[in-house]
Amino acid sequence: MRWRARDNRSVEEPVLPLVKALHEQGVASLLFDFRNSGESEKDITSIGQFEKGDLLSAIDYAKSLGYKQIGLIGFSMGAATALMAAPEVNHLRFLVADSPFADLESYLRDHLSIWSGLPNFPFTPLIMGEIPLVTGVDPSNVKPIEAIKQVRDLPVLLIHAVNDDKIPSVNSVRLKETSGSAKTELWMTPGDRHLGSYLQDPHEYVKKVTDFAVSHF
């Protein structure tokens, strides 16, 4: 069974084609919305800190249905969350991470203005100081780059548009370099849209991800 961790509308474009392709290979999929997104209840979006628990709970649920062999496919925050959850998942066969960030704290310090719409100075330092107090979220605890060190034997496919306009592709480059594993593959695609690799060539994207998943299942 494959789990797809969804966190925004851009994620929806490749999901159904992937589910269809995997189904044709005899692979079941479980899709869910993180807290405060899609059809899930309203809550604080923690950009990975609490969402990791959401993902682990979804995996426990699927295991309760009898599914034992697991693969993870995540997008953006969902990709980062899947990376952080991976060391805690038994019988994990592979992980696909499309457009993840490597380290939330450093990412927000450099790119929070993209999401806030406010100038980086003086607002980003002020917002960063308030986040733990207001939300209980500590960005320094959200480090996919540390988690990937713990799963060097796990087949991982990192996907990133080379000029991603929201999460720079250097994040996936850092993850690949930190992994130091021949089992970690980085697939860089043309374009500048966040989560835009699928739209560059939908057929190639679906084939690449499906072939990777099936080959490790």
Image: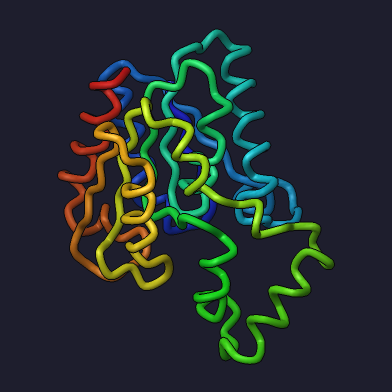
| Residue placed furthest toward the top | 66
Residue 59: x and y in percent read 58, 25
Q: Nearer the viewer, residue 120 or 77?
A: 120
Coloration mode: rainbow
Q: Residue at x 25, y 57 (%)?
A: 199
Q: Nearer the viewer, residue 146 or 189?
A: 146
Q: Nearer the viewer, residue 203 or 110?
A: 110
Which quarter of the rendered picture does the N terminus lie within?
top left
Q: Residue at x 60, y 79 (%)?
A: 116
Query: Vertically, is 27 above or below 160?
Result: above
Which quarter of the rendered picture does the C terminus lie within?
top left
Left or right of residue 194: residue 204: left
Residue 30: x and y in percent read 50, 28
Residue 114: x and y in percent read 50, 78
Query: Vertically, is 96 above or below 109?
Result: above
Residue 28: x and y in percent read 41, 21
Q: Residue at x 37, y 64 (%)?
A: 194
